[in-house]
Amino acid sequence: MAMQIDHQDGFLNIRKIPFDIDAGIGARARIGVIVLATDHTIEYEFRQIVNMPGVAFYESRIPNSPTITPETLQAMEDHISDRAALILPGVPFDVMAYGCTSASMVIGEERVFERIRAGRPEAIPTTPITAAFAAFRALGLQKIGVLTPYRDDINLFMRDYIQKNGFEVPVFGSFNEEDDNRAARINATSIRQAVFEIGRRDEVDGVFLSCTSLRLTDVVEEIEQELGKPVTSSNHAIIWHSLRLAGIDDEISGYGALYRLPV
């Protein structure tokens, strides 16, 4: 339609200015992330790594309690579909990631996938624990040292869940902090010390930090070089997995061995 120029009440009103459109910010890939209402960390770590042209991520927040218990984790299931559908309605996504490790195990990965697909049938679903298993296989890890902030009942459930999926967990460590807001403030020095306490042991091939609140991307390269073993976390793994599932196979330097590998 032709551009229209009208004089109206003392100003020039230019209407129907012609324009062209392109594929947008997510021309190569669009990734959706369902973020916990209490999460301080996952968006920060996504922004660090996902900064290549044409790759975009978008988030919605899901209601959850800051107190991490099996009951509060299970309570998120009913909100997953609508939070997936909330992100850019009408715009297709390549991947939709649910950002809670412990809830993905308590609810069950397949059930989480069903809930994501109900809201976003076109997107490939993933969770932090799904991504962690893919990362372990890509890195060739079998004996996993695990670090969490969780209380003991969740830790025991998690160890059993990982082992039922074909991996060994000979060393397990925890900060035993129930409050997600406090877990997000565990500093880099404390995380480094805990990773080395677990990872230096001969029984483990690598270390996994479980919980999207725990920070790793700032220090993962340095820790791996000093430890001599691969290290990943819930966020570190799900960012990598989301990129690879979306067809982004770029090698990304500065974030450890995993980011030099395909899925």
Image (spheres, rainbow, N blue to C red):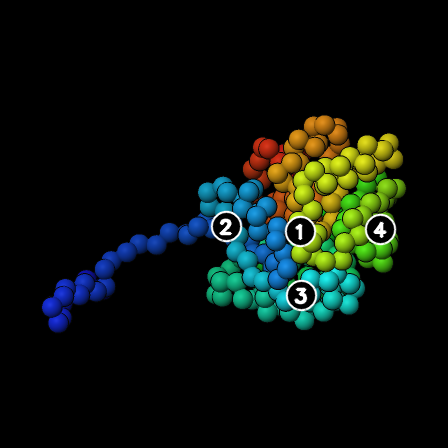
Task: Give the CA separation, mark 1 to mark 3.
Answer: 15 Å
Task: Give the CA separation, mark 2 to mark 4.
Answer: 33 Å
Task: Give the CA separation, mark 4 to mark 1.
Answer: 22 Å
Secondary structure category for the residue under label 4: helix
Q: Residue at 76%, 58% (x, y): give it.
A: 178
Binning the other alpha carbons within 10 Å of mark 1 as few (below 14), some (14 to 19) or many (20 upward) gives some
- Residue to which mark 3 is pinned: 64
Asked whether the beta carbons under mark 3 and mark 2 sit within 8 Å of each other, the answer is: no
Foreground mark, 2 or 1? 1
**In the picture, residue 167 is in which quadrant?**
top right
Query: Looking at numbered disc 3 in the image, what kind of residue is underneath it?
Result: Asn
Foreground mark, 4 or 1? 1
Front-most of residues 240 and 255 = 255
Query: Looking at numbered disc 2 in the image, what kind of residue is underneath it?
Result: Ala
- Residue to which mark 4 is pinned: 159
Task: Give the CA separation, mark 3 to mark 2.
Answer: 25 Å
Query: Looking at numbered disc 1 in the image, what kind of residue is underneath it?
Result: Ala
- Is residue 122 something one can see in this rendering? no
The dot on residue 12 is none
The dot on residue 56 is 2
Front-most of residues 195 and 132 = 195
Task: Give the CA separation, mark 4 to mark 3.
Answer: 23 Å
Q: Mark 4 or mark 1, which has the lower sequence index?
A: 4
